[in-house]
Amino acid sequence: MTLAPQNPDFEARVRDSFSRQSFMSTIGAELTRIAAGEAEIRVPYREDLCQQHGLFHGGLIGTIADNACGYASFSLMAAEHSVLTVEYKLNLLSPALGEALVARARVARAGRRLTVCSADVFVLQDDAEKLCATALGTFMTLENTSDHSLGTAAA
Amino acid sequence: MTLAPQNPDFEARVRDSFSRQSFMSTIGAELTRIAAGEAEIRVPYREDLCQQHGLFHGGLIGTIADNACGYASFSLMAAEHSVLTVEYKLNLLSPALGEALVARARVARAGRRLTVCSADVFVLQDDAEKLCATALGTFMTLENTSDHSLGTAAA
Amino acid sequence: MTLAPQNPDFEARVRDSFSRQSFMSTIGAELTRIAAGEAEIRVPYREDLCQQHGLFHGGLIGTIADNACGYASFSLMAAEHSVLTVEYKLNLLSPALGEALVARARVARAGRRLTVCSADVFVLQDDAEKLCATALGTFMTLENTSDHSLGTAAA
Amino acid sequence: MTLAPQNPDFEARVRDSFSRQSFMSTIGAELTRIAAGEAEIRVPYREDLCQQHGLFHGGLIGTIADNACGYASFSLMAAEHSVLTVEYKLNLLSPALGEALVARARVARAGRRLTVCSADVFVLQDDAEKLCATALGTFMTLENTSDHSLGTAAA
């Protein structure tokens, strides 16, 4: 397994892509860290992000787990390619009650066409992090495809 | 397999629970159908729900697939119990470009403690539905737990 | 979605590949049906295929669910390509006690590179079929790769 | 998260259960390590365990990943309970060519009813281990159920 980035400007490229995802700003998500094969996304608590018990909604947890994995995968890709989520699985582990959610993703294997990545999601409670979910997913390299154009899922 | 509801008032109970999920109103989701072991959720297109190419964000697709499965499962549970997502897997199948997303879930097996449910997600393009994702998940019956109180994941 | 085979001789090709999987004969599996985008595998009960309670072992259930999906996917591929399992998820639904296991797979979407396929697994009890597991997986087209040579996972 | 075993004799109990799984002896699997919340299973290469290219069959990889997770989960359960696989997801990462397969599982979270566990599967090539698959699954505590009796999936 290699986690060597093929694009020296991967950080700028990932941040630019993240900034163009309108849904990330709708949910108040920040890309708090990007490294080769790793990404971290944080969402502060808001009352309008909850399920029926006032916990962070599970869909929000899945959203940032998937997105952190996608950008961890994208960080390793060459400049002419872009990234697509093929699939992911999410296990919810404990109630997501706290001041913020933090998803941390790390690539497990980067192949030419497919990258497999896992993420842990933590909830911040009184400055301590508690693991609340874990995810495992598959991400595809869209060859010679701009991140500004339309990709084709399951291409 | 039985898809017989144990609570004759399941529809009102599901609609009440859905209405208390603030994240559903943040994303503009409507619960468009509920039946015994089945649920449908719809989200009209908005510019602030997108990924970097102007498609519906994958996290949104996962959110309504999970939620439709959760409420399809909840519809079969007795009045004193509530529901919790244990885990789900989502496969993205084609680009989610269109006027609305529709997730349709149907229970595959309802056990005493665990319910397994699948969902297909469609995107509306010029009044035609195109399959854009499919999901399979596991949902837990929280016995003697109000839908108004805090559940415990992986309990 | 198209389920049209690109190789008119897909059945012979799938049967030939199946016959070269030594593990299938170790477990006594038969390929009982192959059609465009569909496959069925059957395993009669044997005492040496069980878990600790005398049920069919879950690993066996996963094995034939994965394999039925793989061959359903392979049936749609052009003659010069071969197939590889990227990933799958299996939910066990009820005890696998009976005279035989039958896995039936059907492609949900066949793309150029990736095919998404689901399978249901049934156990035969007194000539009735009972659903005992369901699976959802992703399969890759290995372009210009013989089914007789070594593929590369996550290529 | 606690990985404290509730049964001081967990190792003997796990080994006894493993020894009663006839499918494990059919595939030549050994339980090479058991600790609180951890398990390792090894399968030496045999010609009758392969897919069409002479690699270890993917079903075999899934089988030992699932089983290692199940026994890692079981090691933490009280003496009067037993374990059941609810579901798992497996990603295949690289060709499984070598002298032996080794699956190592570790519990991510042990709840009262559900345990979430992950496993990595390695293939031994010339005495070096290469990661060839990774899995994430959910396991259920069957309360007051003997490991010698029939459990009920999705109970």
Image: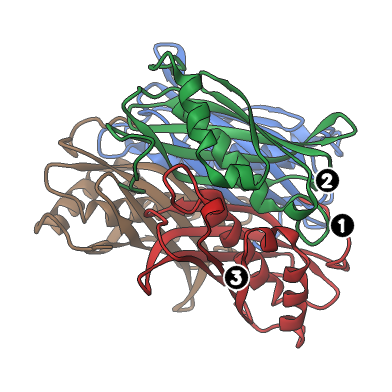
Chain colours: A blue, B brown, C red, D green
User: Which three-letter amino acid code belongs to the residue tagged 1?
Assistant: Leu
Q: Residues within 10 Å of mark 3 (few under 14, many from 20)?
A: many
Residue under circle 1? C150
Query: What residue is shown at x 46% (from left), y 52% (from top)?
Result: C91
Chain assignment, label 2 = D
Q: Are marks 2 and 1 in contact (CB under 8 Å)?
A: yes
User: Which three-letter amino acid code belongs to the residue tagged 2?
Assistant: Leu
Question: In this rendering, would A154 be left or right of D152?
Answer: right
D114 in relation to A114, above or below = above
Question: In this rendering, would A130 be left or right of D54?
Answer: left
Name the front one of labels 2 and 1.
2
Cα–Cα span, label 2 and label 1: 10 Å
Q: Residue furthest left?
A: B8
Q: Residues within 10 Å of mark 2 (few under 14, many from 20)?
A: many
Q: Secondary structure at mark 2?
A: loop
Q: Quadrant of the N terminus of chain B?
A: bottom left
Question: In this rendering, would D120 be left or right of B23?
Answer: right
Name the front one of labels 3 and 2.
2
* Residue nearest the viewer, comparing B44 with C82: C82
- x, y percentage for residue A64? 53, 38
